[in-house]
Image (spheres, rainbow, N blue to C red):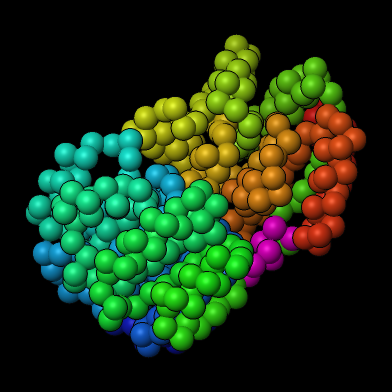
Amino acid sequence: MNLENIKLSEQTKKNLLAIGYSKLTDIQEKVIPLALSGKDIIGLSQTGTGKTASFIIPVLENLKKSNYPQVLVLVPTRELAHQVNEETRKLSQHLKLRTLAIYGGTSIKDQLRSLRFGVDVVIGTPGRIIDHLTRKTLRLDNLKFVILDEADEMINKGFLANIKEIIKMAPTERQTLLFSATTSPDIEIFSRRFLKNPQTIIGEKGKNEENNIQQYYLDTTSRQKSKNLIHFLHLNKTQLILIFANTKRKVEEIGNLLRSKEMRVDYIHSDLSQNRRTRVLNKFRNRQFLILIATDVAARGIHVDDIDYVINYDFPQSPEFYIHRIGRTGRAGASGKAITFITSPREKQQLLKLVKQKNYQINALPAKEYL
């Protein structure tokens, strides 16, 4: 479906065409008309399917500049707050709305200053939103929309109590949109309590992984992992590659090792300041370096188009981490590859069990790819 088939203002269509939104993704095609009609929505969709635009585009159609927030978007991580904020600014540039990302690790003074001058759209992590509500520096009285992005991850991170507290402070007359990659009893209970007759939309859930990501495993040993990684990277010097490790120390170890081999590489983990993490991600997006190493804390915050390879240097600590890691490639219809290093029969058994449950296809990595 193209933009002509959806009832948007000509000004909005003109802006969307100017920034490259000529054809809508599956989730956008399903959500936008319903959201425009005022329905509460539960959207089940993986990352990389264009869901941010699916909720921002219809919301913007119903906003007029105000001194108080009209839209609140709750997200699980700092990186995702930054990403959604940037996307909102791009989509609303013709409206000159004021947006603000609120999360820890950055100057609260700057946030206070922006709130005093007035903002229309607030995107934030539950903890920092609660902080501002407690300080009475953020008012929710004028909210028209509450959006929960990656609700499953927020619940996994222990934010459910905070989210409930925030929602209770929002006006009862509002539109609520909830997006999640997976469903769970917590999400179902929450939806029944806080959403009004919601419409459930199922996007291309799992379709991207199965069709667009070629998944491989590499049988190796703990001692040989670094050697195999270095050989692989030398063979793929022009590719954009994201490497996952399980600990901050291991992330830094890999970074130092690759730098000693004169590779242009950087890393992110939770001990780094938010400003540093943002700078690193922007450089990665702009291909100022081609190899990024990260912990799972950063997994959901990495929204970078055209990543060629995701490498699980360390075996993921849960099936959810595996799914979210490999979902960093093969985004929005692009193709990608994911490689998992296997160092024990137990890891191999766990991986094969997971891919069977998810109906994924996975193969051993051909020797020519890394030797």
Q: Residue 227 appears in which quarter of the rendering? A: top right
Point 86% across, 49% down: residue: 352
Marks counted in the figure total: 0
Q: From the viewer's perspective, is residue 161 above or below residue 146?
A: above
Q: Which residue ends up furthest to the top in the rendered image?
A: 260
Q: From the viewer's perspective, is residue 66 above or below residue 355?
A: below
Q: Where is residue 24 in the image (x, y as percent from the top left)?
A: 50, 73
Q: Position of residue 55 (x, y in %)?
A: 41, 70
Q: From the viewer's perspective, is residue 200 above or below residue 358?
A: below
Residue span colored magenta? 204-210
Q: Residue 119 appears in which quarter of the rendering? A: bottom left
Please say whether residue 99 is visible from this viewpoint: yes
Between 193 and 92, the one lying in front of the other is 193
Between 268 and 68, the one lying in front of the other is 68
Residue 43 placement, left or right of 54: right
Residue 152 placement, left or right of 146: right
The magenta stretch spans residue 38: no
Point 38% across, 55% down: residue: 162
Image quadrant containing the C terminus: top right
Q: Which residue ends up furthest to the right in the rendered image?
A: 345
Please say whether residue 283 is visible from this viewpoint: no
Q: Position of residue 255 (x, y in %)?
A: 57, 21
Point 36% across, 85% down: residue: 38
Residue 142 placement, left or right of 226: left
